[in-house]
Amino acid sequence: MIDLELFRKNPQIFKSEIEKRGLKIDISSGIELDRKKRDLILKIDRLRSEKNIASKTIPGLKGEKKNKEISRMKEINEDLKKMETELNDIENKFILHFSAYPNLSHVSTPAGKDESGNVVESYFGKKPEFDFKPENHIDLGTNLDILDEKRAAKISGSRFVFLKNEAVLLEFALVRYVLNILTDKGFTLLLPPLLVKEMAMYGTGFFPVEKTQYYKTELDDLFLIGTSEVPLCGYHSNEFLESDALPLKYAAFSTCFRREAGSYGKDLGGLFRVHQFDKIEMFIFAHPDKSWEEYEGLRDILEEIIKGLGLHYRIVNMCTGDIGTPNAKKYDLEAWLPGQENYRELASCSHDTDFQARRLNIKYKDGKKKDLVHTMNSTACAVGRTLIAIFENYQDCNGNIRIPEALLPYMNGMKIISRRKKDK
RNA sequence: GGAGAGAUGGCUGAGCUGGUCGAAAGCGCUCGACUCGAAAUCGAGUGUACCACUAACAAGUGGUACCGUGGGUUCGAAUCCCACUCUCUCCGCCA
C-alpha cells in the first residue's frame, strides 16, 4: 500500500511512477474517491458526536423531553445508516483502487517498460567450456535416473517432477550448505506454515494483483504459499519492533506452489518452471535509515552462496516495467545454463521499502518516534533451479554429473553421479 | 470429530443485573524529586488508527472509531443476541 498522505500532497509522483511502470491507473479517480471518502467521514463523525452527547443527557431527562430527544435520535440513526452504507461502498472501491498502485521505485532502478529495459550490472566467473555438446538438465537427469517427469505427469499432470536417487541427496546437501551459511550470517531459521490466510497474501502484496497464481484449498479458505516471503513477512504483522533489535533477519525453507496460469508452453518440461518447488528465502526487517545498505548486503549473501557453488552468473538490475508491484528495486541473479546456452533466473532480491509494512502494520519504536519498518527479501537458494545449474554446469562427456566441491561434505563421500542406469 | 472454558490496553487482571468505561488495580515503561550514585520511596505521565482545524521539517486542540472478527437489538453495549475465528482443557483419531 502506498503512502496516502503523500498521495494527497503530491499525486503527480504516483502518476509518473505508474507511467514509468507501464501501468494503467487513472489517478484522478483516486483523488476523487479520497475526497468523497473524507467528506463523508466528516459528516458521519459529526452526527455520531451529536448522538454521543445526547446519550449522555438522555438519562437525566424525563417525560415529554426525554421522548422527544429519543425520537430525534431515531431520525439521526436513519440518516447515519444511509451514510454508513455509502461510506462502506466508497471504502470498498477505495481499497480496490489503491491496492493496484505500485510502490515508488528507487532512483537506482532503471526506467523501462519491459524486460528489455533491464540493466546487467555485473558478471561473476566465466562460462564453462566443453569439448562436447552439453546436454540439458532434463536429458541428463532422465538418463541418470535422478529425474522422472513422465511418472509425475501420470499422477499430477504437467509441471510436476519426481526427484530420485542422488538428486534427492543433492537437494538436501544443497539445503544443508545454504543453512550453514545463513546461520553464520546471523539469520534466524524458520520452517513456516505453507498454508496461509488470504490476509497474509494481501499484506505481502501478492493479492489482489496476482490472485490467479496461487492454489486455494476448497474447504478452508487457505492459500498455498508461492514463496515463504508470505509467512516470513506476516511473522511480525501488527507488531512494534524495538529499533535496537533491527535488523531482524530470518531465513525459511519451504516448498512453494504456483499455478503458473498463463505461462502455457513456456519452459515446459524439467525442473525450471514447475507447480511445486523448494526454496530457502531470506527476509529482513530493517530501519528505514539503514535499509539500502542492508539490501546490498543481502545481495552479497546471495552471491556468496552461488559463488560457492562455482556457478557463472550475472546480476541484473530490473527496470520499472519488470519489477513487482511492491518492489522499489529488484535484482535478479541469472546463472549460465550450458544446456540452454542462456542466462536464466536463479534468484531474485527485492527491496520493498515500507510497502508491505504499511499493509501488515509493522512498525518500529525508537524512543518517542514510531514509523514503518522497511522489508526486503531475497532467494537464498531456489533448490530446483540450482539443481538445473549444477546438472548442466557439472556434466562430463559421459553424461555424468560431478558434485560441486562445496557440497562434498554433505554427500557421504560421493563425488560423481554416474550413468550406471543408462539403459533402464 | 465430540464435550467444556475463554478471548479486555506492553503484560497480569477487574468490569459483563446496558448509561461520565478508553475502560479499576497491579506490574512494566517515561519524566521529575530524594541520593555522591544506585536501590527503595514519593509525585506526574504512559494505547492505536482515522478525520477536522491550527501549525508546520516537530507538534497542539477538537472529534470519531476500536475491549478476538463481522453483524444485530437499543436513544445508548466491553456489558444483551447471532455467526465466525482463534486459544486452552478433556475424550476420540492421527504422522
Image: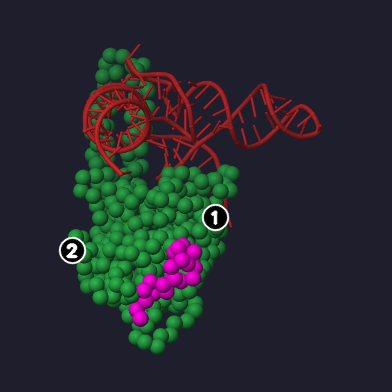
Is label 2 in a helix, a strand or a loop?
helix
- Whole-percent x, y for residue A176 in the image: 46, 59
Position of the N terminus of chain A by quadrant: bottom left
**Residue located 45% across and 63% down the image:** A412
Residue A108 in magenta?
no
Name the residue furthest left.
Answer: A154
Position of the C terminus of chain A by quadrant: bottom left
- Where is residue A3, by image quadrant? bottom left
- Whole-percent x, y for residue B81 in the image: 23, 24
Is label 1 in a helix, a strand or a loop?
loop
**Frontmost residue, A279 versus B20:** A279
Badge 2: chain ID: A
- Number of the front mark, 2 or 1: 2
- Whole-percent x, y for residue A423 in the image: 25, 75
The residue under label 2 is A154
Q: Which mark is residue A186?
A: 1
**Residue located 49% across and 44% down the image:** A240
The chain that appears red in the image is B
Q: Amino acid at mark 1?
A: Gly
**Frontmost residue, B82 versus A265:** A265
- Where is residue A155, by image quadrant? bottom left
**Residue located 49% across and 52% down the image:** A188
Q: Amino acid at mark 2?
A: Lys
The chain that appears green in the image is A
- Whole-percent x, y for residue A360 in the image: 40, 49
Residue A407 in magenta?
yes
Mark 1: few/some/many CA within 10 Å (<14, 14-19, 20+): few
Do callouts 2 and 1 mark residues in contact (Cβ within 8 Å)? Answer: no
Would residue A374 be visible to someone looking at this image?
no
- Where is residue A397, by image quadrant? bottom left
Please state if A98 lies on the left or on the right of A282 as rendered. Answer: left
The residue stretch that appears in magenta: A398-418
